[in-house]
Image: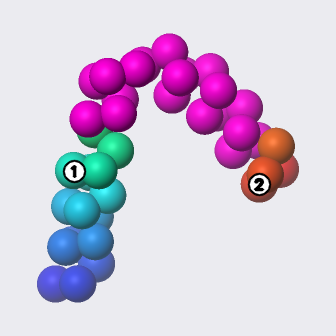
Amino acid sequence: MIPKLNGQILTVCIFPFLRMDGNYFQNDLVRDIKIHYG
């Protein structure tokens, strides 16, 4: 139950940003993830 709830929270938090600025998530976010996590 808790993991499902956490997934829903992440989805609710992330999706508005995906809709607002897709370019950031396609480029800068992916680059930042690669920089920080390898």
Of the image marks 2 and 1, the number of the one nearer the N terminus: 1
- What crowding class fits label 1: few (fewer than 14 Cα within 10 Å), some (14-19), or many (20 or more)? few
Q: Position of residue 2 (x, y in %)?
A: 23, 84
Image side of residue 5 versus residue 13, left or right: left
Q: How many marks?
A: 2
Image side of residue 4 versus residue 36, left or right: left
Residues in magenta?
A: 16-34
Which residue is rendered at x = 42% and y = 19% of the image?
22
Q: Position of residue 16 (x, y in %)?
A: 26, 35
Image side of residue 11 versus residue 34, left or right: left
Q: Residue furthest bottom?
A: 1
Where is mark 1, residue-wise? 12
Compared with 25, 14 (above or below) is below
Does the magenta-highlighted stretch encompass residue 11? Answer: no
Q: Amino acid at mark 2?
A: Tyr
Q: Secondary structure under badge 2?
A: helix
Q: Position of residue 19 (x, y in %)?
A: 28, 24
Compared with 19, 9 (above or below) is below
Q: Amino acid at mark 1?
A: Val
Which image quarter: residue 8?
bottom left
Where is mark 2, residue-wise? 37
